[in-house]
Amino acid sequence: MSPFLAELIGTMLLILLGDGVVANVLLNDTKGNNSGWMVITTAWGLAVFVGVVVAGPYSGAHLNPAVTIGLAVAGKFAWAKVVSYIVAQMLGAFLGAFLVWVMYYDHFKKTNNPGFILAIFCTGPAIRNYVSNIASEIIGAFVLIFVVFYIADGQIIPNKTPIGLGSVGALPVAFLVWVIGLALGGTTGYAINPARDLGPRIIHYLLPIKNKGTSDWQYAWIPIVGPIAGAVIAAELFLQLK
């Protein structure tokens, strides 16, 4: 499998399972309806585990433009590969979100709450305040990238081991994403991943979903700029502390 295809498939699985659990919790007449935040955060952590297991041996399993950019800033990933990785991640996010719609098609038709429908595809603030919202995304992404650097740093084998989430093993990163969701996710829904938010938001805009309402484009820059800024800060601090 090529690194491009690995990032595409890994991100597709991440979004299929991550957005899928939100659909299971929020859409009407599902088996998991109203099962809560613990279910959502746990499944997102396990979704990361699945994506990393599949993509890790081939691409390093970034699955996130913020991870890719953060690793490049830290000198652990070639800048020449950044664009191809991000394109693959975006395509994977598109496909994963589309499959969630296919999977829960009947339940989308039975749900009349536009806010719930949008929340399946992308994040949004509990309290809309762009300054605190972007701060939340910066802090969440900072924790993700900074800890990944320290988990991965002792396992780098030059020219042999791909540097990224896949190089550290899937389970530690799954726990990391889980605790970020539990501890820091209550303000904005912890996008911490531009592809995870933008790709499905575009799919939400394009799909003919009854009662879907707006795609909230005025907020869409927050889960793009925030995670990238958090990743850059984490990379710079990591370099200073080494």
Image (cartoon, helix red, strand yellow):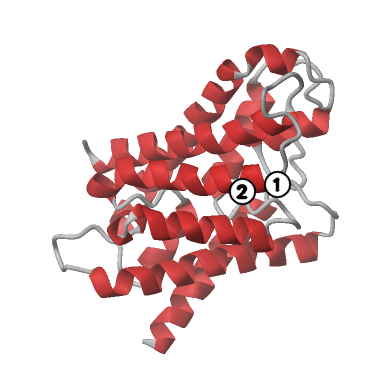
Q: Is residue 184 above or below residue 194?
A: below
Residue flagged by tag 1: what amino acid is it? Trp
Residue to which mark 2 is pinned: 41
Residue flagged by tag 2: what amino acid is it? Thr
Q: Residue drawn 61% across and 64% down?
A: 140
Q: Residue drawn 54% across and 51% down?
A: 193
Residue 37 numbered mark, or none: 1
In the rendered image, the quadrant that contains the N terminus is top left
Q: Is residue 122 above or below residue 100?
A: below
Q: Residue drawn 30% across and 35% down?
A: 5
Q: Is residue 72 left or right of residue 127?
A: left
Q: In which quarter of the view is residue 53 placed? A: top left
Residue 242 numbered mark, or none: none
Residue 236 location (% of width, % of height) = 46, 78
Q: In which quarter of the view is residue 242 placed? A: bottom left
Q: Is residue 79 something one can see in this rendering?
A: yes
**Marks 2 and 1 in Cβ contact (< 8 Å):** yes
Separation of marks 2 and 1 at Cα, in angstroms: 6 Å
Q: Is residue 220 something one can see in this rendering?
A: no
Residue 186 location (% of width, % of height) = 74, 56
Residue 67 location (% of width, % of height) = 44, 58
Secondary structure beneath disc 1?
A: helix
Q: Residue drawn 56% across and 38% down?
A: 18
Question: How many numbered marks are there?
Answer: 2
Secondary structure beneath disc 2?
A: helix
